[in-house]
Amino acid sequence: MSFVLLSLIPFQPTVSLRHAAAPPKDFPVNLSVIPDLTMQGADSPFSTRPTVTVGRLAGLVRELAASPGDWWHLARFDGVPVRLLGEAEVWLSAWPPGHRAAPVADVLAVLAGELSERTITDHGVAERAVRANRIRVYGAGHPRELVNPGPAYAVSLHATV
């Protein structure tokens, strides 16, 4: 059984629907505390260098992956990563078959070959393939390991905030 309770007392709003009164003329108005909405995600004009975010790193990795002529000659096929010049921490790695490492990276892009990613969570160990032409963005938290399971080299870019 359901019913509706109706009140016989007339409704009186507790919030005034009138406009707020203008501040007195001697009231100091400080507009510097109002954020500049026109910046729309641009760098702060007060910072000395651009803010590096995971999203910007993903964009940078995508741009680098699209221009291999700029960095391919730097690749070392001895398992030692090469730091690419720039403001962000971006590393170029060539993975020999069977190579295993636990890089600390916020963004990963496999450029050639395939890597296998093993992540340790509260629910156990999860494994998945990370293939070429994909950008993987990581959140903070779980330890992970990358392995080259294939018979040939894999090449990847890693970036860290």
Image: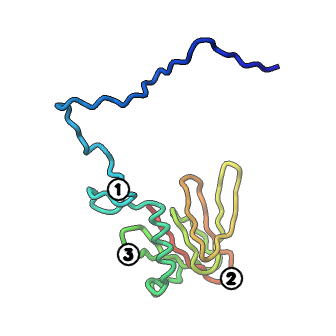
Furthest residue in direction right, as rendered: 1
Q: Secondary structure at mark 1?
A: helix
- Determine which residue is flagged by label 1: 38
Q: Residue 151: give its label.
A: 2
Q: Is residue 23 left or right of residue 107?
A: left
Q: CA distance from mark 1 to mark 3?
A: 32 Å
Q: Which of the pair 73/60 is nearer the observer? A: 60
Of the image marks 2 and 3, the number of the one nearer the N terminus: 3
Give, as a three-letter code, the residue at label 1: Thr
Residue 26 position in % (x across, y down): 17, 31
Residue occupying the point 61% across, 70% down: 100
Residue occupying the point 36% across, 31% down: 19
Q: CA distance from mark 2 to mark 3?
A: 30 Å
- Determine which residue is flagged by label 3: 85
Q: Is residue 96 left or right of residue 71?
A: right
Q: Nearer the viewer, mark 1 or mark 3?
A: 1
Contact, mark 1 vs mark 3 (Cβ under 8 Å):
no
Q: Which of the pair 149/32 is nearer the observer? A: 32
Q: Residues within 10 Å of mark 3 (few under 14, many from 20)?
A: few
Give, as a three-letter code, the residue at label 2: Pro
Q: Secondary structure at mark 2?
A: loop
Q: Quadrant of the C terminus?
A: bottom left
Residue 129 position in % (x across, y down): 68, 69
Residue occupying the point 57% across, 69% down: 135
Q: CA distance from mark 1 to mark 2?
A: 52 Å
Q: Residues within 10 Å of mark 2 (few under 14, many from 20)?
A: few
